[in-house]
Structure formats: structure tokens, C-alpha cells
Image (cartoon, rainbow, N blue to C red):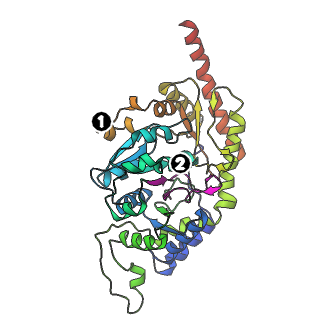
């Protein structure tokens, strides 16, 4: 059986984790700090804060920006539930907009959704393909849009416009206009969940790219306190001789990342750019070279001038089929010992959002992408021989269905 997304674990990772276990210090300390520095360097930003999940990271930043009950945050309808749940957890309302053919938020729809209550936009780099950040910035900096902005916190007053947050759960290593993702939005939140390109088992990292007059270093220091229950010293600092005294200056959260988990990500990050990411691109290219020969296949975006994907997912689409037929194809692929997936069920189709009044009929593009999408296995350990097995399983399963579909259309 070819698995869908196993984690990459080698001896270097085991050694890094073992070193932490033997150090006598497991929670937030020097290894987490080192991971933050490496992610900041990789993303070309001044500061990055490691947290216990990407969801926590988005909640923390929305809270930091003063977003609260009565505020609105624009999100794409096509994303994982955490994007919208983070908004709900700070008391605000997610305002969903439709997406384009690349699965990413549609800039044309964003402008129509902005009201005087809008405080932030969360863009999602689906599958690792970057959003149109130039387009989004041109919207939030538009004179008429700025006139609508009603700041209600110090941070909002200082920024003077709608904040742009990148939910880059899929996108570590992606490039937009020759800049790494992390340096493209005001705030970028990466996921280090078990299935991500770089993992810490569970975790996330916030990349700070705030413009002047903000000091990203000062905001990092504040956010670090907020992520540690508002405590002025972390547990590691308090263990030093005579350093037991601390204060709690804010009713903060418990969102810190422990060293034992940071060690996994740190070891992976050291070989990410020159090995792990290249291997993901190899698999991506293998699939595209095969499927681009078939007129029923819609291959995902990967590269254009100045932009490239992190190749987190390979979301293959099958032309002219519906949800029921897509599900039959998935069953057939599974019968050939290949695990595939679907990314994602659009938010308005999920019970929690349906009950809140969202309707998938308002997001036709999101539904049209979902009903014929199949995510294929893509990870460094996949050999070319295994990639061949995957492509053959997909081709055979699709072409099994297509003659039946053609026959039915002739009958009608």
C-alpha cells in the first residue's frame, strides 16, 4: 500500500530529539529559540515565534491586532476549517469569499466583501501555491477601502489599514515575486503539523513582517509573553541561578512550543531547501509530466515567473465529472493499493458553518473545484517506481469510469 502522507524521519532527526531528551530539558528553551531563528532566516524576516499549532498562531495574531466580537475577517471558502475557526475563537465573524481556479482567494471578491467592520484578511496558499499578494495589498491600500477602516486598538491605529495574514500552513518554501512566503504578508503563520513539509509533530511558527512604525523585535518579545500565559520569564530562564522571580503582566495563553518537538522540525529544516523540497518537486514534476498528456486531467499550478509552489499537495482535477463520480474513482484507486485524499470540503458544506448560515450555493467556484479534486501522495520518500504505480492507478481508475460515462451520454 502506498501511504498518503507519512512523516519524514531519519537518523539525524532521531539524534536531534535524543539530544533534547538527554539534555534534561524538554519544554521551551534553546532548541525552540534556534528553530525560530532558522525559520526567520529561511523566510527572510527579522523575527519568528514558535507556537503549539498554526491555529494557535492565527488566534494569537488576531487577538494581538485587537480583533474581537463584532469585527469581521475575510477568509476563503476553500480552506481547512482552522482558518475560520481561529476567527470565531476570538469572537469575530468569518466573512467567506469564493476562490479562483488556482484554489486561492479571489481578489475581485475580496473588495466586495469589505465593510466598516473588516479588520483583517486571511489568505491561504492552497497546496503551497502563493496567493496574489500584490492584488491583496492594492485592495487594502486603496483610498476608498482605507476610508472604511475603523481602528479600535493601538495595533490597528498603528497599521492604519486592514491587516493581511497569510495562512501558510501548506507553503513553507514557496516563492512569490521572488520573495519567500513569510515575507509577503504582514503576518505569516506556518504549520508544522505531522503531514506538513516540515513537521514538529504538532506546532506552528509565526513570521513577523510588520511595516514601520512597528518594531518586529518588540512585537516578538510581546507575543512571546502572550504565548506563555503573560509571564515575563519562560521556564528555562527561571531555572538559571537566582532568576526565579517573574511577573504576569497580561492574561495570556498557553501556546508555546517545547524543545522536544522543535528538535524534529529543526533537523528537517536543515535539509529542507537542498533535499526535502527538491524531492517533493521531483514527485510533483513526475505527476505533471504524465497527467499533462491526458485531456481529462487538470494539473495544479506549480511555477510561473518569480513564483513557485512548495509542492505540499498535488491536487489533480478530473474534467467533467461530479462529486459522486470522483468518489468512485477514489474507491477504485484505493483498490489498487494507493491512498489518496480530497482537499478540502469547502467550509460552507461543513455542519458548523451551515448552521451559522453559510450556503455552498454562494460559492460556486469552491464547489466546482471540490467535486472533481483528488489529492495524490507527494513526499520525499516516494520513489519514481512508486510514482509510476500512483499514476497508473489513477489513469486506470479514471478511464474505467469514462467509457461508462460516455456510454450513458450516448444513451441520453
In the rendered image, the vertical position of residue 348 relative to residue 278, given as above or below: above
Residue 213 appearing in the image? yes
Q: Secondary structure at mark 2?
A: loop
Residue 301, position in %: x, y? 63, 41
In the rendered image, the vertical position of residue 405 relative to residue 47, given as above or below: above
Furthest residue in direction top, as rendered: 411
Q: Secondary structure at mark 1?
A: loop
Residue closer to the observer: 180 or 231: 180
Read off the residue under disc 1. 357
Residue 4, position in %: x, y? 56, 45
Q: Quadrant of residue 42?
A: bottom right
Q: CA distance from mark 1 to mark 2?
A: 26 Å
Q: Which label belongs to residue 125?
A: 2
Residue 4 appearing in the image? no
State which tag comes first along the sequence, 1 or 2: 2
Residue 145, position in %: x, y? 42, 47
Residue 193, position in %: x, y? 49, 56
Apparent side of residue 262 relative to residue 52 in the rendered image (left or right): right
* Residue at (51, 33) in percent of width and height: 369
**Category of crowding for the residue at label 1, using alpha-carbon neighbours closer than 10 angstroms: few (below 14), some (14–19), many (at least 20):** few
* Residue at (30, 81) in percent of width and height: 247
User: What are the residue bounds of the magenta stretch?
Assistant: 163-192
Q: Indicate yes or no whether the magenta region holds residue 409.
A: no
Q: Quadrant of residue 152?
A: bottom left
Amino acid at each position: 500500500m502506498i501511504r498518503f502522507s507519512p512523516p519524514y524521519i531519519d537518523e539525524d532527526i532521531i539524534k536531534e530529539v535524543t539530544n533534547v531528551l538527554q539534555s534534561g530539558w524538554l519544554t521551551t528553551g534553546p532548541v525552540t529559540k534556534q528553530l525560530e531563528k532558522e525559520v526567520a532566516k529561511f523566510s527572510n524576516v527579522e523575527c519568528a515565534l514558535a507556537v503549539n499549532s498554526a491555529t494557535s498562531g492565527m488566534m494569537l495574531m488576531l487577538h494581538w491586532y485587537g480583533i474581537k466580537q463584532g469585527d469581521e475577517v475575510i477568509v476563503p471558502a476553500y480552506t481547512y476549517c482552522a482558518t475560520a475557526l481561529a476567527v470565531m475563537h476570538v469572537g469575530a465573524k468569518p466573512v467567506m469569499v469564493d476562490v479562483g481556479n488556482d484554489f486561492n482567494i479571489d481578489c475581485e471578491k475580496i473588495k466586495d466583501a469589505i465593510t466598516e467592520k473588516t479588520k483583517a484578511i486571511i489568505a491561504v496558499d492552497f497546496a503551497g501555491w502563493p496567493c496574489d499578494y500584490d492584488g491583496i495589498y492594492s485592495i487594502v491600500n486603496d483610498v476608498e477601502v482605507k476610508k472604511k477602516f475603523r481602528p479600535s486598538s493601538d495595533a490597528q491605529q498603528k497599521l492604519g489599514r486592514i491587516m493581511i495574514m497569510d495562512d501558510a500552513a501548506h507553503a513553507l518554501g514557496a516563492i512569490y515575486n521572488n520573495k519567500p512566503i513569510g515575507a509577503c504578508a504582514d503576518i505569516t503563520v506556518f504549520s508544522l503539523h505531522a503531514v506538513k513539509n516540515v513537521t514538529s509533530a504538532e506546532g506552528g511558527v509565526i513570521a513577523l513582517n510588520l511595516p514601520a512604525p512597528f518594531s518586529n523585535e518588540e512585537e516578538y518579545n510581546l507575543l512571546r509573553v502572550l504565548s506563555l500565559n503573560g509571564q515575563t520569564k519562560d521556564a528555562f530562564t527561571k531555572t538559571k541561578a537566582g532568576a526565579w522571580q517573574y511577573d504576569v503582566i497580561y492574561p495570556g495563553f498557553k501556546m508555546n512550543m517545547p524543545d522536544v518537538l522543535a528538535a524534529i522540525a529543526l533537523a528537517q529544516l536543515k535539509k529542507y531547501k537542498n533535499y526535502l523540497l527538491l524531492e517533493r518537486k521531483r514527485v510533483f514534476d513526475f505527476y505533471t509530466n504524465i497527467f499533462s498528456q491526458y485531456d481529462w486531467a487538470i494539473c495544479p499550478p506549480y511555477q510561473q515567473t518569480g513564483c513557485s509552489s512548495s509542492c505540499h499537495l498535488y491536487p489533480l482535477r478530473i474534467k467533467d465529472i461530479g462529486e459522486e463520480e470522483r468518489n468512485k474513482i477514489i474507491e477504485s484507486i484505493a483498490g489498487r493499493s494507493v491512498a489518496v485524499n480530497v482537499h478540502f470540503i469547502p467550509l460552507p458544506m461543513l455542519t458548523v458553518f451551515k448552521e451559522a448560515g453559510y450556503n455552498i450555493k454562494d460559492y460556486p467556484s469552491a464547489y466546482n473545484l471540490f467535486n472533481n479534486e483528488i489529492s495524490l501522495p507527494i513526499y520525499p520518500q516516494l520513489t519514481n517506481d512508486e510514482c509510476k504505480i500512483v499514476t497508473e492507478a489513477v489513469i486506470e481508475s479514471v478511464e474505467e469510469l469514462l467509457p461508462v460515462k460516455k456510454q450513458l451520454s450516448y444513451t441520453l
